[in-house]
Image: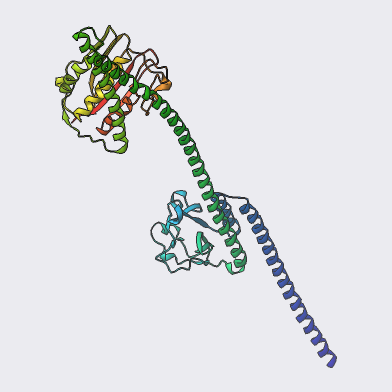
Amino acid sequence: MQQWGSSEEILAELLHSQRQISQMAAELGELRSKLADRTHQMTVLQHLAEILAATPKINQVVSVLLDVFVQEFNAKRCVIWILEDGGSCFQSRVGSGLPKAQWSQLQLPAPNPFPEAPIVLYQPQWLDVDSLQGAMRAMKPEGKETSLFFIPFEHQLLLMGFAILELETGHQLEEDLDSLTILQRQVAVSIYNAWLFRDLGEQRDALRVKTGELERANAALREADRFKSEFLALTSHELRTPLTGILGFTRLVLDGLYEDEAEMHQMLRDSYGSGQHLLALLNDILDLAKIESGRMQIRPEPWSLHVLVEEVKPIASAYPRNPGVDLVWPDGLAEMPEVSIDPGRMKQVLLNILSNSLKFTKQGTVSVGVERGFGSIALRVVDTGIGVSLEAQGNLFQKFVQADGGHSREYGGTGLGLVICKHLMEMMGGSIQLQSEGEGLGTTITLTMLIA
């Protein structure tokens, strides 16, 4: 009996040992499985870190992250938000398990995307789906088998973005918390770096634009300086010519160097004409100075074009012109509605344009036409003169520029007339345009005025 009892004890010990061995084998298998999972997670994290380190664009970062959540975390649905617009809102960038028309509309406020929900923004946690408001209700799971999990991406106490995953309710995330923490840090730093990279790119582009603007401004300044130097040389010549005539004719009269009273009167008339020319040149310079200093005053009022043209006719008809050049005036102005202009300044503009056209027309006609448009009336001065080259047309409304600029010009003037006309027309609410097919093909200048 003692021997039989001893055998039972041995058998019991063997069974106990076998159970221990089976338990240890199961634990070893579980440890091996966990080790394999951990090794796989570390491999995925390492691969993800390499991708994130080489990716300066946020869209690529979130696309890679979405794949990780769907494939490694088995997320049924997933949407990732990124801080946008200088930190004013969180914009959904990528999504899975929802139509794009739904997840792309899920814009949330910043810095707190869930102002109505009790949530710690810097810590991953399960979400209370009942607290989801507005368009976010589209994320609400349909059954009880899944729940929503919040994963923030925080860097230097700034929520750079976050992801919301729909996972199985029993998902054991506690085992993945270490990997999840590493993933959060990697993604947050990548988003922050992408932010900096984008800002630096925008600053670089802005700097490139500013550099181009400065280069163009410097070129314009150099061109303006050249025009100014040429203008000073031309103006000194233009002012000296009539002044020399005034002094010369006056000296002849004072010295009595004339044959009779008729010749003396002719000298005085020539002196007076030179004085008028000198005054016109000085008025151009003074008008431009007033315009640029903002002291030029314009008082638009309803005015008849018929009255305006009738006042201009005798003055323009007396302007010097080449023999055979006809000045043609329009008909039917009395039927035109009144326009909103400053009569004195509009008269100045029209006389300046007619003077130029007569001066630059060697043969043919200078004709004035009128056309009514929608809410405006266009007055056109068309000549058969020397025309303007296509290259020179872009500079004609700049200060100190003439189409035939240069010290050996055939025609006089300061080159300020069209500039002053442009400013005056714009101050009256109208516009001025010049059109020419090229040199020798005449010029058309259109003055557009608003109907009063």
Q: Nearer the viewer, residue 202 or 256?
A: 256
Between 246 and 423, the residue placed more toward the observer is 246
Residue 105, image x and y in percent? Answer: 42, 52
Q: Compare residues 387 and 81 and report the one nearer the observer.
A: 387
| Above or below for 224 versus 436 | below
Q: Position of residue 69 (x, y in %)?
A: 57, 57
Q: How is the image coloured?
A: rainbow
Whether residue 341 is visible: no
Q: Nearer the viewer, residue 47 or 338?
A: 338
Q: Residue at x 59, y 69 (%)?
A: 174
| Residue 251 position by quadrant | top left
Residue 444 spot, x, y in % from top left:
31, 18
Farthest residue to the right: give it. 3
Compared to residue 320, the image places residue 446 above or below, namely below
Q: Can you say which quadrant of the picture contains the C terminus?
A: top left
x, y percent for residue 116:
39, 66
Left or right position of 452 against 225: left
Q: Residue at x 65, y 61 (%)?
A: 41
In this view, the residue farthest toward the bottom is: 2
Q: Does the image show residue 127?
A: yes
Residue 168 vertical placement versus 240 (above, below): below
What residue do we see at 82% from left, 86% from top? 7
Tell me the quarter of the image containing the N terminus.
Answer: bottom right
Tag count: 0
Q: From the viewer's perspective, is residue 293 above or below residue 58? A: above
* In this rendering, position of residue 67 left or right of residue 140: right
The image quadrant of residue 155 is bottom right
